[in-house]
Amino acid sequence: AQWLCVPMIAIGAWLLTRRR
């Protein structure tokens, strides 16, 4: 779960920037 916290936030922000 800890190692999934960073990727989740990184992917989330990355997808948001791509959608924009």
Image: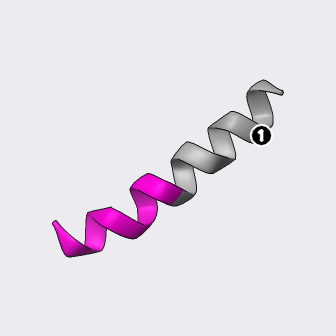
Q: Please identify the residue farthest to the bottom as the structure is shown.
A: 2
Query: Which image quarter: residue 20?
Result: top right
Q: Does the magenta-highlighted stretch encompass residue 4? A: yes
Work out whether 4 lies above or below 13.
below
In the image, residue 2 sits, relative to residue 15, either above or below, namely: below
Could you tell me which residue is drawn at 63 percent across and 48 percent down? 13
Q: Secondary structure at mark 1?
A: helix
Horizontal arrangement in the rendering, residue 7 relative to residue 13 (left or right): left
Q: How many marks?
A: 1
Residue pushed farthest left? Answer: 1
The answer to if 5 sits in the magenta stretch is: yes
Residue drawn 55% across the image and 59% down it: 10
Residue segment shown in magenta: 1-9
Compared to 1, does 18 lie above or below?
above
5 horizontally vs 20: left or right: left
Identify the residue at the far right of this view. Answer: 20
Query: How far across and how far down the image is residue 7, in percent?
Result: 43, 61
Find residue 15 and report its horizontal and vertical position in percent: 64, 37
The main secondary structure of the magenta stretch is: helix
Quadrant for the N terminus in the image: bottom left
Q: Is residue 20 left or right of residue 4?
A: right
Residue 3 is situated, as x and y percent measured from the top left of the image, at: 27, 73
Q: Please name the residue shown 32% across and 65% down the image.
A: 5
Which colour assignment does the render follow? Answer: one colour
Residue 13 horizontal side relative to residue 8, left or right: right
Three-letter amino acid code at the position of disc 1: Thr
Mark 1 crowdedness (10 Å alpha carbons): few <14, some 14-19, many ≥20 = few
Position of residue 4 measured from the top left corner of the image (x, y, whole percent): 29, 63
> What residue would you read off at disc 1?
17
Choose top left, top right, bottom left or bottom right for residue 12.
top right
